[in-house]
Image: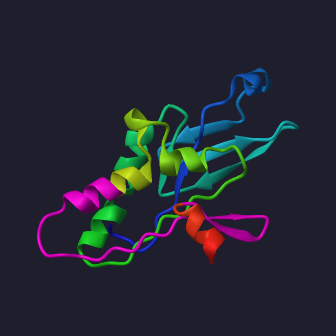
Amino acid sequence: MSSSCHVILRVRPLAPAEEAGGRCVACAPRSVAVQASEGGGRDFAFDTVLGEASGQEDVWAAVSGVASSVLDGYTAALLVYGQSGTGKTFTMVGGGESEGGLVQRAAELLCAAEGEARTVTLSIVEVYQERVKCVAWPAAEAQS
């Protein structure tokens, strides 16, 4: 990756119950325009914007350089942030084998790498209502 920090926005599709209200977000490759219900609005800039039609493969294409940088000896992190129900877990874990999430894809990349032996440490945590919860190994959290 060319920079130490990239901000990528993924806009999830509207749920059927939300469609009646209409869309208030317009996506461009590097920006999002948000329209307020009472008129007006705001534009926001990002390094990459993945619109409603983007799939897991598109997300992986946008962030795979982070996982690849680990193979080059760099420390890397992915932070997924958003309100409840916005697709954070789906993005990270996926929705089955055909829609693998970022964790699965990164693990596959790292395990397939040839060359010298490496040690990789993985932490997957959820911060909810100011509590930190281990998502990867919940049983280990209960023992500590």
Q: Indicate left or right for 57 with 46 as reference.
A: left
- Identify which residue is drawn at 29% across, 77% down: 119
Q: Indicate left or right for 127 with 80 as reference.
A: right
- Identify which residue is drawn at 75% across, 27% down: 18
From what the image shows, is residue 15 above or below residue 25? above
Q: Quadrant of residue 3?
A: bottom left
- Identify which residue is drawn at 46% across, 64% down: 6
Q: Indicate left or right for 65 with 30 as reference.
A: left
Total residue callouts = 0
**Residue stretch rendered in magenta on the structure:** 107-135
From what the image shows, is residue 32 above or below residue 129? above
List x then y, in percent, for residue 79: 54, 64
Q: Please identify the residue farthest to the left as the structure is shown.
A: 115
Colour mode of the rendering: rainbow
The quadrant of the picture occupied by the C terminus is: bottom right
For the residue pair 2 and 128, the one nearer the viewer reads as 128
Q: Is residue 142 magenta?
A: no
The quadrant of the picture occupied by the N terminus is: bottom left
List x then y, in percent, for residue 45: 57, 56
For the residue pair 116 and 18, the one nearer the viewer reads as 116
Q: Please identify the residue farthest to the right as the structure is shown.
A: 38
Q: Indicate left or right for 29 with 98 as reference.
A: right
Q: Quadrant of residue 15?
A: top right
For the residue pair 28 and 2, the one nearer the viewer reads as 2
Q: Is residue 115 magenta?
A: yes
List x then y, in percent, for residue 70: 30, 71
From what the image shows, is residue 102 above or below residue 100? below
From what the image shows, is residue 61 above or below residue 20? below
List x then y, in percent, for residue 131: 74, 70
